[in-house]
């Protein structure tokens, strides 16, 4: 069953396809190579036959037929029984000397079989015939046996090489398919474990940086994100149940008190006003939760437009400077070099800046100095909000970004624990980097936004 799955797997099929393509390319290259070798051997054969013919013909330079006949006889004696052909005939066509019977060989280059030359066997010969003087005709030839032998050896060599390549390709494809199958099984197994509830399962990596590793890294990052969202939802559910239980109980007690006073004929206006205020706080908490959920869903990205973050911070500073003074705190705004534009939602950016200022005012005692600064570089625009209040312990800086999380566990101070959660949601939506650090004393909130385009200087 496992073998059948492997044979049907995409990696094995791809390996077979590429092996087949490689094999076809190797066979074509082999055929071309064999043909090239054969052409070179034929050219060498013609060169040998032509050279021998020239040497023999040159012996008749002084019209000495005896030297010519003697040289041909020597060549016949040296030549094998059926390897080389020599024939010298007179003007009347009668054979004078040679190792073949009289035969009609055309002038120039030609190819003839053993039967055409009166020889036994099926060998073929390359022949060169020409007239020597006006009385004689010389035929010199050589068999193709050596060429065909070399060709057969070459063809056999390539055949065995092709077989070895085929076996290597199939074996390599099988091994490659097995490795890829294991890795695909690891991915499938991880997905199966996650579907069964093991949200901490992750795809194992080889660390070689190949395509599957890159894909696995991205899948693991997605799983980390989904796991974080799921854990966040669980935490939000628990936090909502915990944080809303107290105000709902207060609302219930207020209503019961009002009912008791009503039955006793006493005025209940104060209790009703308190209940109305409590219900407004509960509604505000739910509205904030829904707003954060909408922001995290990314629907507001459709409203993105070029925004100058310095103008946003200036508007917030102008709106809150008097509020800070009335509460015994001071707000200082520093525009810096903030001419760069970012892509964002203006209303969300205003809400984010307002949340940061309000958070510093709520948690900082009277006399707290709050700083608001915007600065730009070629790549990013940075928004920084500082205060010299109590700050946030380093171990709690990640927790305070969760929904409904509050450092003050008794819940006696105003707030819902959603201010910094809203800031983080807006920062994430804009692809910004949010960092909480120590202002020594107090808190420093830094948010880096990628610029819409780099600064241009004249």
Image (cartoon, helix red, strand yellow):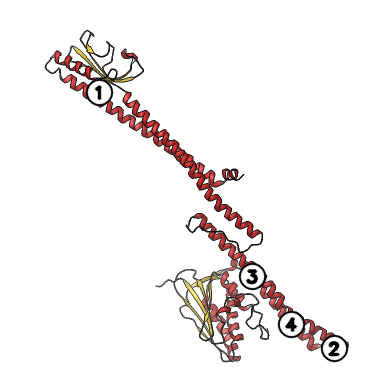
Q: Which disc, if any, is residue 232?
A: 3
Q: Does residue 231 appear in this view?
A: yes
Q: What residue do we see at 23% from left, 23% from top?
A: 50
Residue tagged 2 = 261
Q: Position of residue 363 (x, y in %)?
A: 60, 85
Point out the tag, 1 or 2, that comes first from the N-terminus: 1
Image marks 2 and 3: residues in contact by CB distance under 8 Å: no
* Label 2 secondary element: helix
- Circle on res. 278: 4
Residue, x 46% and y 71% (percent of image)?
A: 379
* Disc 1 + disc 3, Cβ < 8 Å: no
Residue in the foreground of this view, choosing between 452 and 104: 104
Whole-angstrom CA distance, mark 4 to mark 2, is 19 Å
Q: Which secondary structure lies at badge 4?
A: helix
Mark positioned earlier in the residue sequence (1 or 3)? 1
Instruction: Of the two numbered discs 3 and 4 on the same chain, state the one appearing first in sequence.
Output: 3
């Amino acid at each position: 069953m496992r073998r059948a799955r492997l044979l049907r797997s995409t990696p094995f099929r791809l390996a077979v396809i590429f092996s087949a393509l490689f094999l076809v390319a190797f066979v074509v290259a082999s055929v071309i190579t064999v043909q090239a070798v054969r052409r070179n051997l034929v050219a060498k054969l013609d060169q040998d036959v032509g050279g021998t013919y020239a040497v023999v013909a040159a012996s008749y330079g002084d019209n000495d037929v005896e030297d010519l006949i003697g040289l041909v006889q020597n060549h016949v004696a040296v030549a094998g029984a059926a390897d080389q052909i020599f024939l010298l005939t007179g003007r009347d066509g009668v054979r004078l000397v040679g190792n073949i019977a009289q035969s009609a060989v055309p002038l120039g280059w030609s190819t003839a079989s053993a039967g055409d030359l009166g020889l036994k066997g099926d060998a073929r010969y390359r022949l060169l015939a020409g007239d020597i003087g006006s009385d004689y005709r010389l035929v010199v030839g050589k068999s193709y046996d050596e060429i065909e032998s070399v060709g057969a050896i070459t063809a056999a060599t390539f055949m065995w090489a092709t077989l070895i390549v085929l076996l290597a390709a199939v074996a390599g494809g099988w091994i490659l398919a097995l490795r890829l199958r294991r890795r695909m099984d690891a991915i499938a197994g991880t997905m199966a474990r996650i579907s069964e509830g093991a949200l901490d399962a992750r795809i194992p990596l080889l660390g070689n940086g190949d395509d599957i590793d890159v894909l696995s890294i991205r899948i693991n990052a997605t799983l980390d994100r989904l796991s974080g969202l799921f854990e966040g939802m669980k935490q939000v559910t628990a936090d909502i149940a915990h944080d809303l239980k107290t105000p709902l109980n207060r609302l219930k007690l207020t209503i019961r008190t009002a009912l008791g006073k009503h039955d006793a004929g006493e005025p209940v206006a104060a209790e009703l006003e308190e209940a109305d205020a409590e219900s407004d706080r509960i509604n505000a908490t739910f509205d904030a939760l829904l707003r954060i959920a909408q922001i995290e869903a990314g629907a507001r990205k459709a409203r993105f437009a070029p925004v100058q973050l310095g103008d946003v911070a200036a508007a917030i500073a102008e709106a809150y400077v008097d509020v800070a003074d009335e509460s015994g705190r001071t707000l200082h705004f520093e525009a810096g070099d903030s001419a760069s534009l970012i892509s964002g939602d203006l209303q969300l950016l205003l809400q984010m800046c307002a949340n940061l200022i309000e958070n510093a005012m709520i948690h900082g005692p009277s006399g707290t100095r709050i700083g608001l600064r915007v600065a730009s570089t070629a790549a990013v625009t940075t928004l920084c909000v500082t205060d010299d209040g109590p700050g946030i312990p380093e171990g709690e800086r990640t927790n305070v970004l969760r929904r409904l999380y509050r450092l003050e566990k008794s819940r006696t101070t105003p707030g819902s624990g959603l201010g910094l959660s809203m800031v983080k949601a807006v920062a994430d939506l804009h692809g910004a980097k949010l960092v909480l650090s120590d202002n020594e004393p107090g808190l420093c909130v830094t948010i880096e936004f990628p610029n819409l385009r780099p600064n241009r200087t004249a």
